[in-house]
Image: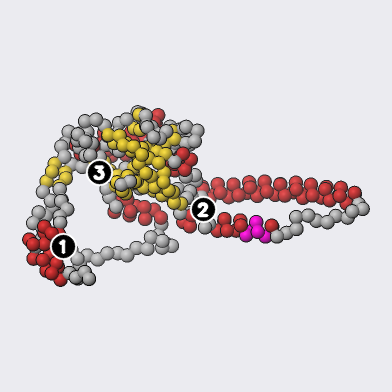
Amino acid sequence: MSPGRTIGRLLSSQYASLPRHSSLPSNSSRSLSSTSQYSSRIGLKSFTQRRMGSSAAAAAAEADTVAAQANYKIVQDAGNFDEVQAKRPDFDHSKPIEVTKTPNPNWEYGQGVPGANLAQKHHEIDPYASDRPMINNYRLLVSGIAPRPVGFLSTVNSKGEKNLSPFSYFQVIDHDPPMFIVGFSSRPGRVKDTYRNLKETGECVINTVSENMIEAVNSTSIDAPYGVSEWDVSGLHEAPSSTVKASRVAESVFNIEGKVIDIKEFEDHQKPGMSIAATVLIKATRFWVKEGTANEDYSHIDLEKLRPVGQLGGMSYGRITSTFEQPRKKWSDEAPKSEILAELDAAKPVDK
């Protein structure tokens, strides 16, 4: 329950306890007239005060937004990126994805991490410390929780205007039912268009991002005015959906139509001039897989055809050039072959 809502109810209850009518002298029409004139003056004054108060509040909110924008450093200054990139090797589109052994094929149960330096200590950080800038938390998280899939969402607003945007805080969280979560971080001024659209219509399409799409996808992150279509900005092509109004990205290997199940807004963390932070829970309503990219029963997408990219720290993205397989094993199969598992098995508590 927000403090604003609580205060509103208290004020309403206080005013409800006041008498609804005041007694006026019965023998004086002049009293009625003067009371009416007095009430009109009070009403005009009250209206003027409200209008002035509203203007002052708007001006204060604008000042808060300007101050927040000055301190907002999420969008990194790339400098002369074209000049830097020109000195780097070309992207190799033909490089196959290699499958190797695991990092330590001879690893045994109880062995831990061979060669790990346990003398190297960890530094404790309070993310809410008064002297720790918010930008430090952002940079730490995106560089330390990596790689992250790109959440590429297409939405429409209540007027049918289209939006397309990538998100860093995104993940699939279940398969039965198929569920996804998207995080919207606080930023100066209004909330992101995608978040506004999700609240208005409750629908979206999640589109996968492959290597050959990344420049077009990244272009949709530009701060276009509300109502401007990033489809036009990027040149990506629309494909019709079945269960939602938003279009699918035709270039994506995999599209997921979805509807909003729940929204959580973090009111207690909102700061002056900043939009509210929120997470949105989305339930899939339809899958689309590009033909020729999956097996016969469409239960597995070929990694060579998907060619996903992952988000890293700063402005960096990563591609997959090498993989290894690591099967999940069963205790009943492994315990007889491992001395340490056999000892743990023998020492386990007996169920009563």
Which secondary structure, mark 2? loop
Residue at coordinates 14% horizontally, 68% vertically from top-left?
344
Residue type indicated by callout 1: Gly
Contact, mark 3 vs mark 2 (Cβ under 8 Å): no
Contact, mark 1 vs mark 3 (Cβ under 8 Å): no
State which quarter of the image contains the C terminus.
bottom left
Residue 66 pos. (x, y %): 51, 47
Residue at coordinates 58% horizontally, 50% vertically from top-left?
60
The residue wearing badge 1 is: 112
Quarter of image, res 12: bottom right
Residue 282 pos. (x, y %): 38, 44
The residue wearing badge 3 is: 318
The residue wearing badge 2 is: 272
Q: Earlier in the sequence, mark 1 or mark 3?
A: 1
Residue at coordinates 52% horizontally, 57% vertically from top-left?
1
* Label 1 Cα crowd, 10 Å radius (few <14 / some 14-19 / many 20+): few
Q: Which residues are magenta?
A: 10-14
Decide if residue 242 is on the left or right side of residue 85: right
Which secondary structure, mark 3? strand
Q: Is residue 327 visible to the viewer in this orientation of the structure?
A: yes
Query: Of tags 1 and 3, which is closer to the observer?
Result: 1
Q: Is residue 349 above or below residue 53?
A: below
Residue type indicated by callout 2: Pro
